[in-house]
Image: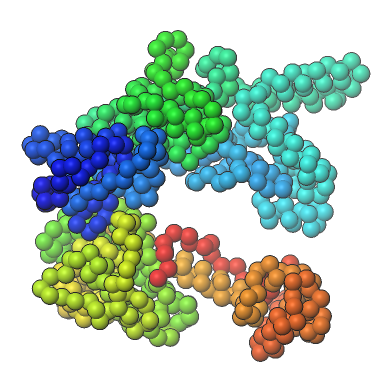
Amino acid sequence: MADPSSYRPKPGEIPDSPGVYRFRDEHRRVIYVGKAKSLRQRLANYFQDLAGLHPRTRSMVTTAASVEWTVVSTEVEALQLEYSWIKEYDPRFNVKYRDDKSYPYLAVTMNEEYPRVQVMRGHKKKGVRYFGPYAHAWAIRDTVDLLLRVFPVRTCSAGVFKNAARTGRPCLLGYIGKCSAPCVDRVSAEEHRELAEEFCDFMTGRTNTYIRRLEKQMAEAADDMEYERAARLRDDIGALKKAMEKSAVVLADATDADLIAVAEDELEAAVQIFHVRGGRVRGQRGWVTDKVEEITTGALVEHALQQLYGEETGDAVPKEVLVPALPDPVEPVQEWLAGRRGSGVSLRIPQRGDKKALMETVQRNAQQALVLHKTKRASDLTTRSRALEEIADALDLDSAPLRIECYDISHLQGDDVVASMVVFEDGLARKSEYRRFQIKGFAGQDDVRSMHEVITRRFRRYLAEKEKTGEWTDGESAEALEIDRHGEIVGTGPTEDDGRPKKFAYPPQLVVVDGGAPQVAAARRAMDELGIDDIAVCGLAKRLEEVWLPGDDDPVVLPRTSEGLYLLQRVRDEAHRFAISYQRTKRSKRFRSSPLDDVPGLGDTRKQALLKHFGSLKKLRSATIDQICEVPGIGRKTAETIAVALARSAPAAPAVNTATGEIMEEEPGTMGSSGEQVTTGAPDERRGQET
């Protein structure tokens, strides 16, 4: 535990101006980010007598080892910089709202030539119009099913769309009138985009315009005795009204507003948001957070506003935001919101009428969410604590392993050998810390040797990071580690010391390997060679779920009902999943490889141009240099290089129809982006970093 007086700035060093400050721990990790109208006054509050500090503030300042600050010109800039740094550094002592579920949105992909209506989750994409969030995906599908009668917008995937365009036959929705079938040119791209715009207008609350228009058309059809058309329009009006009934009117005058309510106790806080558009509740979401710092309701609201609108612009920020308490000061927050929207935003506490009544409903939702979260979490915390204690007892550890790393090796008959590292902190997966490795030291299949290489590389990097931060003791030196046997730079070259999480900077209390005694021995030997003796190692064998320790002839057998065993299994299974998904990705990329990949300076655009011009890689191989030069963007020198590369490569094996034995010609539709026939692999695993 650090003494705050050891790193307290000298009197007069701290400027009396707006700014953002960062507390760092002994590893130079940023553990807290804050903003202040006056840095001098605010930071002075942290360096008073520890007995007078809030327990959480006291924990933060005693964990920290240094403090630094950045001066800005206005409080709005301080607010923006604070949000950016909290998002970038993920400080452990800051309030961070976490969604209690992954909410689905109704999305319209206006960034495509033929916009598509679909359900989307996760991060928002540029050029896509979002409506919601909704509580359930089925609620979105029900609404879309009703609206497609009136706005027959495309809902199919890219694959289905391309297949319909190729065959000239639309999908079922095109036949039953719930899609305008732009895939077969029933409508032009411009006409289809107009339909999508009208769909978006209706979803934003401009409903009466379309209903009045349809009612007028229905009356005209009836006057002209076109009764079948009038009946269809009547049904369309009914569908629109039914879709509108799914969200009742809660505020008059077609109000656009977001209502935010907070329920809190001494330890946690729950936030509920109702999105009201056109006077109707169009979406609802909720967040929960630990109160890891002393914080007021107004500050909780400010953090919620940052989370809610930090990535939004334009109409996604409503004209009116109703809150239970105002941030202090409120002017910078209002100015920041107005900047995100591009026009004025009213941030206030509702005092009377419908808005106050609706705020009470949102408040009840927040209170129920907090109660439900605490009920679930009490059980979860107890289970995880018991699991960590059981692991510590079974492995004879000094304390519970709060950080566990697990490693697994994956390959396909000795090809594409890779490894994974997954991290669990406090019994929960920390996916931002996941890492993946390519085995570089040798070729072929040898899980034990692969495990030794991976552990060596991981902890060599840890030692290098340890030296950078000045943590070496007893005259240790890592100069010999500057370049390892794989040519990886792991030494102490100049780097930007900015507090960002480093790849291998933080050691675990327990290393788990997927395997039995040989893999455990290899991992322990790798650590011993590096002089690391304060990290425990164990292995979990799949066959009987036995736990192996280094040097022991017999495994440790945990009871089948043990929470500790369940946790080790989850960690091992996650490492296996992450490793095999990476291995499949590499295999899929290898299958998509092409001789054109070896041509220097030949990018994807010119590869596609070559394949489009010749139709297949087979025909490109038989082309002359003059014929290759006919492709736009291909000069004679490049054409010669392409011809040499294709001549050196052996032709791909022909595809064979297994039913008839017939040799099949290559078709353009079966080629990947590089020109070879594609073998489909598993979905790409995006998370983690390759090392």
Report the side of 296 relative to 162 (left or right).
left
Residue farthest toward the right in the current orientation of the protein: 224
Query: Considering only vertical position in the picture, is 595 above or below 547?
Result: below
Q: Evaluate whether residue 401 shows in this view.
A: yes
Q: Which residue is drawn at 74% across and 45% down?
A: 172
Query: Considering only vertical position in the picture, is 349 above or below 617?
Result: above
Residue farthest toward the front in the current orientation of the protein: 12
Residue 142: % across, % down: 61, 34
Report the side of 613 relative to 208 (left or right).
right
Q: Evaluate whether residue 388 shows in this view.
A: no
Q: Residue at x 44, y 35 (%)?
A: 308
Q: Residue at x 72, y 48 (%)?
A: 113
Quarter assignment of residue 472: bottom left
Residue 105: % across, % down: 54, 38
Residue 547: % across, % down: 23, 68
Residue 668: % across, % down: 75, 70
Quarter assignment of residue 509: bottom left
Report the side of 165 relative to 552 (left or right).
right
- Closer to us: 311 or 660: 311
Quarter assignment of residue 511: bottom left
Query: Considering only vertical position in the picture, is 262 above or below 384?
Result: above
- Closer to us: 488 or 280: 488
Q: Residue at x 61, y 44 (%)?
A: 127
- Closer to us: 193 or 662: 193
User: Quarter of the image containing the C terminus?
Assistant: bottom left
